[in-house]
């Protein structure tokens, strides 16, 4: 098929994607196409993406260390900030060691293909993030996708397992499109019973969940029981990059086997310093106050939408999906909201299964209750117009 025909095919299926231009900062209000709108689709949950403490740390790091790490750490060396950040991540996640990766996508591809290969088996939740699926495919291990959050079904699949290869169970901590939380206690029991490794991708839980923001594992009381705690700096932490918090030996294995670590220039000083500042902020009183505001905003917003008759799934976190059904209605919904001054993304296949399209609303600590009440009212008006409620 020609490139032109392929693009036409994407368009005719209603799956054509473009990006939108934002002027200025990623705050809770942004200037989009010259007009100020309410941001309801950012993962900047705590508002740290434009926090002065992070900006100052990044500027100071550039002045002291320059703008680039200049090569992979295995080539031109680890910089002080890589070490400092890894020490902070290990303390945050209460693990013996950790390794920083260039992004969550790179981390998942690198970690999973380092841990599993031919002859091994990976059990992956059906709704796991695409980067986990890609990592599993890249690894060459057998990939078994289990029904979403269904630990009983996973137990049956584990019982049937044959062979002597390594076994990896991998799950999102907080599911990115549904906002629900993985049953980590049950998964820990299963991984112990079946001599498997458990990996949790807490891209949306880190900084947000648990009394100290350590993530879904802290919330569910299983901090010490997870073999690989993966997390990212680009969402609640307002920076960029990712990490695996692990044992010392797993860290060594990744340095030797994770190709996205080995064959890619490491993160630059400004990014490392911003991440370091973010971790310190998340653990401070200000961090706790931001989390409290975020959770209050999420329950306010979810409650208002449910009261209007929307189905918002079974999540309890800052990710609030509004189920809208088919692709066309969903994209129309998103367009009409933008006309009203609300920026919320419609989510379509292949990000979610066909027929499970949704408006994915994400809350921020920096939204005011008034802004959210206003938005919920507009959303209900559009929902009635389109027959969603
Ligand atoms: C965003 C996300 C990633 C990818 O992280 P990036 O740093 O954006 O590459 C991985 N896993 C999950 C669950 C995510 O939501």
Image (cartoon, rainbow, N blue to C red):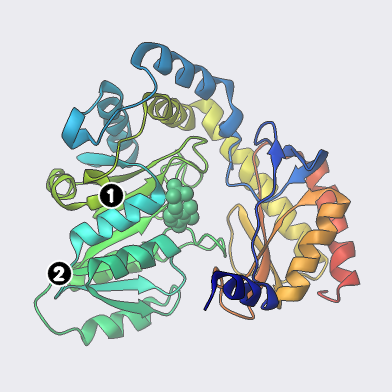
203 left or right of 119? right
140 left or right of 147? left
The numbered disc on residue 166 is: 2
Q: Position of residue 372 (x, y in %)?
A: 78, 47
Q: How many numbered marks does the figure carry? A: 2
**Circle 2 — which element?**
loop
**Outermost residue to the left:** 164
The reply to whether residue 28 is visible in this rendering is no
Q: Position of residue 33 (x, y in %)?
A: 79, 43
Q: Position of residue 21 (x, y in %)?
A: 70, 43
Q: Nearer the viewer, residue 340 or 267?
A: 267
Q: Nearer the viewer, residue 267 or 206?
A: 267
The numbered disc on residue 260 is: 1
Q: Position of residue 25 (x, y in %)?
A: 66, 32
Q: State the residue at coordinates (78%, 73%).
A: 329
Q: CA distance from mark 2 to mark 1?
A: 21 Å
Which sits earlier in the primary sequence, circle 2 or circle 1?
Answer: 2
Q: Quadrant of residue 379?
A: bottom right
Classify 186 as above or below 53: below
Mark 2 or 1: in front is: 1
């Amino acid at each position: 098929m020609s490139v032109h025909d392929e693009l036409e095919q994407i368009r005719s299926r209603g799956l054509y994607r473009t990006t939108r231009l934002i002027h200025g900062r990623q705050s809770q209000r942004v200037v989009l196409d010259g007009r100020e709108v309410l941001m309801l689709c950012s993962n900047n949950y705590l508002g740290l993406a434009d926090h002065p403490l992070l900006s100052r740390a990044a500027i100071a790091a550039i002045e002291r260390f320059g703008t680039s790490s200049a090569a992979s750490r295995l080539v031109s060396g680890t910089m002080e900030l890589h070490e400092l950040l890894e020490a902070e991540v290990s303390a945050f996640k209460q693990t013996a060691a950790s390794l920083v990766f260039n992004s969550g996508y790179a981390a998942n591809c690198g970690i999973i293909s380092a841990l599993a290969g031919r002859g091994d088996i990976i059990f992956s939740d059906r709704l796991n993030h695409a980067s986990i699926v890609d990592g599993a495919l890249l690894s060459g291990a057998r990939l078994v996708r289990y029904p979403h959050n269904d630990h009983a079904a996973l137990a049956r699949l584990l019982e049937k397992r044959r062979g002597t290869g390594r076994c990896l169970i991998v799950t999102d901590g907080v599911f990115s499109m549904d906002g629900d939380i993985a049953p980590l206690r049950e998964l820990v029991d299963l991984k112990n019973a079946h001599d498997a490794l458990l990996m949790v991708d807490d891209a949306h839980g880190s900084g947000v969940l648990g009394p100290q923001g350590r993530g879904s594992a802290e919330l569910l009381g299983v901090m010490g029981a997870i073999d690989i705690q993966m997390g990212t700096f680009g969402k609640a932490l307002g920076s960029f990059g990712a990490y695996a918090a692990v044992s010392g030996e797993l860290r060594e294995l990744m340095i030797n086997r994770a190709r996205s670590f080995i064959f890619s220039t490491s993160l630059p000083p400004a990014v490392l310093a911003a991440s370091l500042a973010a971790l310190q902020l998340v653990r401070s009183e200000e961090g706790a106050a931001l989390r409290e505001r975020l959770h209050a905003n999420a329950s306010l917003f979810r409650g208002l939408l449910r009261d209007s008759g929307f189905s918002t799934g079974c999540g309890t976190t800052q990710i609030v999906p509004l189920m809208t059904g088919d692709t066309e209605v969903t994209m129309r919904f998103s367009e009409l909201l933008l006309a009203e001054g609300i920026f919320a993304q419609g989510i379509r296949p292949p990000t979610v299964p066909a027929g499970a399209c949704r408006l994915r609303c994400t809350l921020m600590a920096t939204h005011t209750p008034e802004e959210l009440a206003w938005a919920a009212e507009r959303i209900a008006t559009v929902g009635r117009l389109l027959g969603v409620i």
